């Protein structure tokens, strides 16, 4: 197993992204090719509902609700298509996978208590 991880680290060209967890609202900027030498950045904002894998094979799933329809997109962290990731809001959740948000509608599907709100209420 150590040989596999050593090879992955050798060939990894992974960028440094901010630390984000499941339940956080993030904005992922994806490079979209327009022409052979031209790209544009497309923002995709939503809630991180899952993180899987480790090392080069790590992926995360972002869910957003657009025009009343839920859309999920899986992003590999090791890809060069992701330009940057911004953490909009940190969420406080008790689960590793938030698949239950698929059955929620409206504000219940997007409202997750933030870490800052919980600390301010107790103090």
Image (spheres, rainbow, N blue to C red):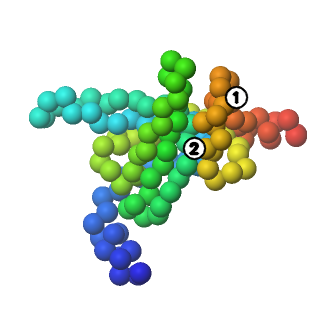
Residue under label 1: 108
- Residue 29 x %, y %: 38, 35
Quarter of the picture containing the N terminus is bottom left
Dot 1, how many residues are within 10 Å of its Cα: few (below 14), some (14-19), or many (20+)?
A: few
Which secondary structure lies at badge 2?
strand
Q: Nearer the viewer, residue 61 or 82?
A: 61
Compared across the picture, whether 26 is left or right of 106 comes to left
Question: Is label 1 in contact with label 2 (beta carbons under 8 Å)?
Answer: no
State the residue at coordinates (32%, 30%): 41
Q: Nearer the viewer, residue 88 or 52?
A: 52
Instruction: Report the number of numbered marks.
Output: 2
Compared across the picture, whether 115 is left or right of 89 comes to right
State the residue at coordinates (88%, 39%): 123
Give the label on residue 22, or none.
none
Residue under label 2: 49
Which secondary structure lies at badge 1?
helix
Q: Farthest residue toward the right?
A: 123
The quadrant in which residue 55 appears is: bottom left
Dot 2, how many residues are within 10 Å of its Cα: few (below 14), some (14-19), or many (20+)?
A: many
Compared across the picture, whether 14 is left or right of 95 comes to left
Q: Is residue 87 visible?
A: no
- Residue 87 x %, y %: 54, 38
- Residue 19 x %, y %: 54, 50
The quadrant in which residue 122 appears is: top right
Tell me which label, 1 or 2, sits earlier in the chain: 2
State the residue at coordinates (44%, 53%): 59
Q: Farthest residue toward the top?
A: 67
State the residue at coordinates (52%, 24%): 69
- Placement of 112 over or under 78, stated as above or below: above
CA distance for labels 1 and 2: 14 Å
- Residue 5 x %, y %: 38, 74
């Amino acid at each position: 197993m150590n040989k596999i991880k050593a090879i992955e680290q050798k060939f990894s060209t992974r960028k440094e992204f901010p630390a984000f967890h499941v339940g956080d609202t993030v904005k992922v900027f994806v490079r979209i090719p327009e022409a052979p030498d031209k790209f544009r950045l497309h923002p995709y904002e939503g809630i991180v509902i899952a993180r899987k894998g480790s090392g080069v094979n790590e992926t995360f799933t972002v869910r957003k609700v657009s025009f009343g329809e839920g859309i999920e997109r899986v992003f590999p962290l090791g890809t060069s298509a992701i330009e940057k990731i911004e953490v909009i809001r940190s969420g406080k959740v008790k689960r590793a996978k938030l698949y239950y948000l698929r059955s929620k509608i409206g504000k219940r599907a997007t409202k997750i208590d933030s870490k800052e709100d919980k600390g301010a209420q107790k103090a």
